[in-house]
Amino acid sequence: MTARPFEALATGLGLPPAASVWAAGWEASQACFPDPLPGFLTTAELAATCRRIGFSTELRDVVLGALPEVTSDPRLCRLLWHLYRRLFVEPGMLKDDLAAWPALPLAAMPHADLFPAFAYLAGLPQIEARYRERSLPREVLVDTLSDLELWIREHRAKTGRWGLSNLRWLTNHFSGNLLRIGRLQFQFATSRYPYHAWRQPGTGRVQLLADTDLRFSADGLRAGSAPELPLAAPYRRDAVAVYGLPIAPRGHSLPEPVALPMAEWTGCLEPGDPVLNLHIPAGSPMAVEACGESFRKAGKLFPKCFPEYASRAYVCGSWLLDPQFEGALGPESNIVRFLREVYLFPLADASGRQTVERVFGTPEIDLATAPRDTSLRRAIIAHLERGGVWRAGGCVLFPEDVAGWGTQVYRR
Ligand SMILES: CC(C)(COP(=O)(O)OP(=O)(O)OC[C@H]1O[C@@H](n2cnc3c(N)ncnc32)[C@H](O)[C@@H]1OP(=O)(O)O)[C@@H](O)C(=O)NCCC(=O)NCCS
């Protein structure tokens, strides 16, 4: 098949109108279409990719089984080549608007939902080259890209079909913007949280202060059922001290403003500073020792492989950082044990949506019939039945405090 205008291909394949986002760059990609086929569409190369990326045998067989559905239709081969180039060449996945990418209609091929996964797999050599340039261990590559299978399985759990829908999230992994080291994922980012952190080098103490204009409710949180208090203490600093409303390491504001003398305290995190954003992938429990090991390894790996990246802290915003879990789950819970090792801070989201979605698989549940098979599910339901709300929370951990992991360093 010779190159056809994108519109003709879109009509022929029955693509939805939203597929017009793919039109840009079509002619350029078709001009370099490798005849007769891109190497990544051969069985041998795809099997090798599945092995190098660490796919399970089950998923490898599914992907290899679906390959002829693509290769038997020259239009799909050309579209896949184009999408591969959109992700890995021009404009590049971090610049492309993947949220606007439509799904391939099921009529185009039986495993249509897997189509974008083929495009990601095609880029494995590029991401491998990037890892080599940075002398990153193979193990980190395989662990990082293991999220592809995880999200393919998530798609299957939700739809019953093998496929990939969370394209945006995976741009992080395939662009080198996120690395999985042991149990945790670390993403290059700037701190987007409205808190300033100060350290007293003499004692090692860390104090978070709320940013200007941040309002809290009577319970020290930023949202929920308690009434909002008037603005207590705008954050400011002068030659003598830094002034503001303190946040306790357990994740709530304290009632009285403080002044930290400049002679004793040094700033260690400002909004906008470079940080490593934490994520906890699904797949296994988050044993607190394994998390500590991840931080220790990250503390060595990032300065060695990314010496120019001056990350100031590890930060995270998540449903599982709601301090209420401390009262709702037993002390042996990994979530509770994690909460005690980090400096918590309040976030404004009290919708509880992410909490319910990540724990029940859907953002809306019927309290009467929702499953109560784990202590977390029981705790979430019990709290909602009492009229409580679940909130997202945030946390920070400083590299210099990782040595104290396991000793509740911010609470001592
Ligand atoms: C984060 C995660 C690994 C924590 O799991 P964990 O280490 O087992 O956590 P805990 O030890 O605190 O779990 C306490 C209990 O809740 C259960 N539990 C934990 N996460 C659960 C979930 N997402 N859904 C249902 N039950 C869950 C555990 O099995 C355990 O049950 P039990 O006491 O009845 O034996 C897990 O929730 C998960 O994989 N979530 C999806 C990924 C995610 O949300 N990441 C955070 C986004 S940054």
Image: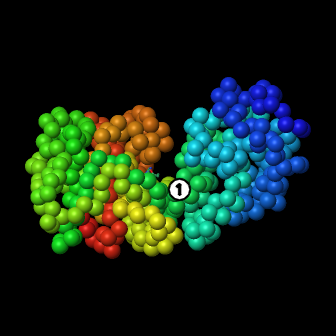
What residue is disc 1 on? 177
User: What is the x, y in percent for residue 47?
Assistant: 77, 60
Residue at (21, 70) in percent of width and height? 201
User: What is the x, y in percent for residue 208?
Assistant: 23, 55
Q: Quadrant of the N terminus?
A: top right
* Amino acid type for the residue under numbered disc 1: Asn
Q: In the picture provided, is 330 more to the left or to the right than 55?
A: left
Q: In the picture provided, is 225 more to the left or to the right than 352?
A: left
Residue at (89, 49) in percent of width and height? 36
Split into quadrants, the picture shows ligand 1 in the one at bottom left
Q: Nearer the viewer, residue 190 or 356?
A: 190
Residue furthest out toward the front = 239
Residue at (49, 73) in percent of width and height? 304
**Secondary structure of the residue carrying numbered label 1:** loop
Q: Nearer the viewer, residue 240 or 256?
A: 240
Q: Quadrant of residue 368?
A: top left
**Coloring applied to the structure:** rainbow
The verdict on label 1 being within 8 Å of ligand 1 is no
Q: In the picture provided, is 313 more to the left or to the right than 324?
A: right
Dot 1: within a 10 Å radius of its alpha carbon, few (fewer than 14), some, or many (20 or more) residues? some
User: What is the x, y in percent for residue 158?
Assistant: 58, 41
Task: Judge whether 174 appears above or below 97 on screen.
Answer: below
Q: Nearer the viewer, residue 128 or 219?
A: 128
Q: Quadrant of residue 13?
A: top right
Q: In the picture provided, is 279 more to the left or to the right than 327?
A: right
Q: Quadrant of residue 7?
A: top right
Answer yes or no: is residue 160 visible. yes
Residue at (30, 69) in percent of width and height? 401
Q: Quadrant of the C terminus?
A: bottom left
Task: Judge whether 238 appears above or below 140 on screen.
Answer: above
User: What is the x, y in percent for residue 245?
Assistant: 16, 49
Task: Judge whether 293 appears above or below 271 on screen.
Answer: below
